[in-house]
C-alpha cells in the first residue's frame, strides 16, 4: 500500500512538472522528504521559495509558519499548500499578537524608544508584521548572531521573540552578560528580572521549543559517563546550560555540515529533532551518530505531514481542487515582508 501511494505521488509530480514545487524541512519524515524538490533549514527554504517563479503550487512539507513565510515571499498567483493544517509549531504559538502589543506597550513605558524587535522566523505572520512595522527583522538559527549584532547597531535594546533560548545563547556568544538580559513573561505580563532594568540590553520573550527543551544537562552527563570520546552537538533552541555543556552548538545546517565533515570513526550525540538524527545516522554509517536523549525527541507537529496527507493534497490539486491553502492577508503580508527582506 505504501508503494502504491508512492507511485501515485510520483505520477502526479511527473504530470505537474515545474508547476509544482515541494520544499521539505530537514525535520520531516523520510517517507515525505523523498519527494522534496529541495530540502533545507528554515532559511534555505524561505530563500528557495522566494525564487520559485515558475511554480503555481508550493506544497510545503514543514510547519505552518514556514508555509506562511513562503506565501509572503511568493507572487500572489502562487498557491502555498500545507498538507496537514494541524502541522503547527508550539514555539511559534507562544507569542500571539495581542500579547506582543501589550508587552511592547509596557516596554515602551519602561524604556522609551530604545528597543528594536527581532523575531525568530518560527513565529506567526502577525508577529513578523509587528516586527517589520517597528523597524525590526526576522532571524533564523543560522544567522541569529549576525542579526543580533545588526539590531544592536540600530537601537540600545533588542526584544527577541519568541524563543528565549536562541536569544540568550546568541547574546551570550556576543559577550552580553546574563545580568544584561531580562525575560518578558507574556502570561504573567511582567519582567522576570532582579535588579535595575536600565541595565537591560536584551529582552527575551518567554517561549521555548518543546522538542529542544527535552535535552538536558543530565543527558550530557550520562553520555559522557558512558563514553568520554563522544562529541556532543546541540541546536541553540536548547537551554543555555545544555549549550554550555555541549562541545558544539549551532543551527540545523551547522549540525548537518559538522557531522558530514567529521572524521570516520568519530562519535556524535546530537541534540535536535529525531527525524534528522535518524537520517544522519543512516547517511553516516562510518561514524556513530545517536540522539543525545535516549527518548529521541520527535517534533509531533512536523510528523503530521505524512505520506497519506501528501498524497491527499497532491491528488486534490491534480483534480483541480486547491485544499489547505495558506494565505496571509495583504496588510500583514506587506509588513511581514519588510521584516523578512531586512534579514535577506
Ligand atoms: P532551523 O531550521 O532554522 O535550524 O530551525 C529549527 C527548527 O526548529 C525548525 O522548526
Ligand atoms: Fe516548532 Fe520546535 Fe517543532 Fe521546530 S522543532 S517546528 S521549533 S516545535
Image (spheres, rainbow, N blue to C red):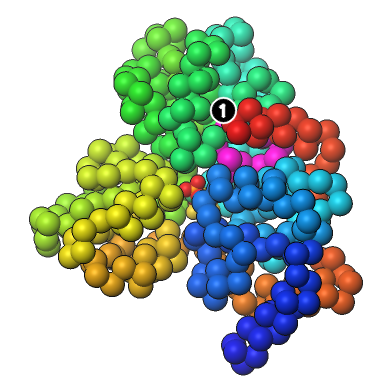
Q: Residue furthest right?
A: 320
Q: Is residue 121 magenta?
A: yes
Q: Specify the quadrant of the image occupied by residue 238.
A: top left
- Between 209 and 56, which is closer to the camera in this rendering? 56
Q: Is residue 112 magenta?
A: no
From the image, which quarter does the N terminus lie in? Answer: bottom right
* Residue 164 picture quarter: top left
Q: Which residue is mark 1?
A: 118
**Which residue appears at 61% of the width and 12% of the height?**
108
Q: Is residue 56 above or below residue 160?
A: below
Q: Position of residue 71 (x, y in %)?
A: 75, 48
Q: Badge 1: few (under 14), some or many (20 or more) residues near its Cα, within 10 Å?
A: many
Q: Is residue 290 above or below residue 194?
A: below
Residue drawn at x 55%, y 69% as measured from the top left: 33
* Ligand 1 under 8 Å from disc 1 Cβ: no
Q: Position of residue 220 (x, y in %)?
A: 21, 52
Left or right of 151: which side holds 258?
left
Which residue does the image show at 36% across and 65% down from the upper left? Answer: 280
User: Would residue 212 appear left or right of 267 to someone viewing this image?
Assistant: right
Image location of residue 324, percent across then percent down: 78, 62
- Res. 6 in view: yes
On screen, residue 134 versus residue 89, left or right, reads right
Q: As rendered, which of 114 and 207 lies closer to the eye?
A: 114
Is 229 positioned to the left or the right of 198 in the image?
A: left
Query: Magenta residues?
Result: 119-130
Residue 2 location, x and y as percent? 59, 88
Query: In this orientation, does residue 86 appear?
Result: no
- How many tags in the picture? 1
Amino acid at each position: 500500500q505504501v508503494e502504491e501511494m508512492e507511485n501515485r505521488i510520483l505520477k502526479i509530480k511527473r504530470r505537474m512538472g515545474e508547476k509544482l514545487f515541494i520544499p521539505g524541512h530537514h525535520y520531516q519524515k523520510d517517507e515525505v522528504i523523498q519527494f522534496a524538490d529541495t530540502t533545507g533549514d528554515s532559511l534555505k527554504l524561505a530563500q528557495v521559495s522566494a525564487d520559485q517563479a515558475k511554480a503555481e503550487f508550493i506544497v510545503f512539507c514543514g510547519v505552518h509558519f514556514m508555509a506562511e513565510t513562503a506565501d509572503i515571499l511568493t507572487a500572489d498567483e502562487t498557491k502555498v499548500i500545507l498538507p496537514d493544517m494541524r502541522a503547527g509549531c508550539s514555539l511559534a504559538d507562544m507569542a500571539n499578537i495581542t500579547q506582543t502589543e501589550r508587552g511592547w506597550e509596557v516596554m515602551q513605558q519602561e524604556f522609551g524608544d530604545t528597543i528594536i524587535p527581532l523575531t525568530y522566523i518560527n513565529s506567526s505572520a502577525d508577529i513578523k508584521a509587528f516586527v517589520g512595522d517597528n523597524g525590526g527583522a526576522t532571524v533564523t538559527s543560522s544567522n541569529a548572531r549576525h542579526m543580533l549584532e545588526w539590531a544592536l547597531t540600530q537601537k540600545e535594546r533588542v526584544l527577541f521573540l519568541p524563543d528565549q533560548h536562541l536569544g540568550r545563547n546568541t547574546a551570550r556568544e556576543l559577550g552580553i552578560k546574563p545580568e544584561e538580559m531580562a525575560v518578558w513573561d507574556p502570561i504573567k505580563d511582567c519582567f522576570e528580572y532582579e535588579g535595575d532594568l536600565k541595565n537591560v540590553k536584551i529582552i527575551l520573550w518567554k517561549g521555548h521549543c518543546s522538542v529542544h527543551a527535552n535535552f538536558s544537562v543530565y543527558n550530557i552527563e550520562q553520555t559522557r559517563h558512558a563514553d568520554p570520546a563522544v562529541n556532543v552537538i546541540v541546536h541553540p533552541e536548547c537551554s543555555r546550560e545544555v549549550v554550555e555543556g555541549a562541545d558544539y552548538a549551532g543551527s540545523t545546517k551547522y549540525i548537518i555540515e559538522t557531522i558530514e565533515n567529521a572524521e570516520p570513526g568519530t562519535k556524535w550525540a546530537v541534540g535536535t529533532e529525531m527525524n534528522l538524527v535518524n537520517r544522519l545516522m543512516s547517511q553516516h554509517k562510518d561514524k556513530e551518530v545517536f540522539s543525545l536523549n535516549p527518548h529521541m525527541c520527535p517534533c509531533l507537529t512536523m510528523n503530521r505531514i505524512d505520506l497519506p496527507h501528501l498524497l491527499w493534497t497532491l491528488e486534490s490539486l491534480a483534480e483541480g481542487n486547491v485544499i489547505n491553502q495558506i494565505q496571509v492577508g495583504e496588510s500583514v503580508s506587506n509588513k511581514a515582508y519588510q521584516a523578512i527582506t531586512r534579514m535577506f
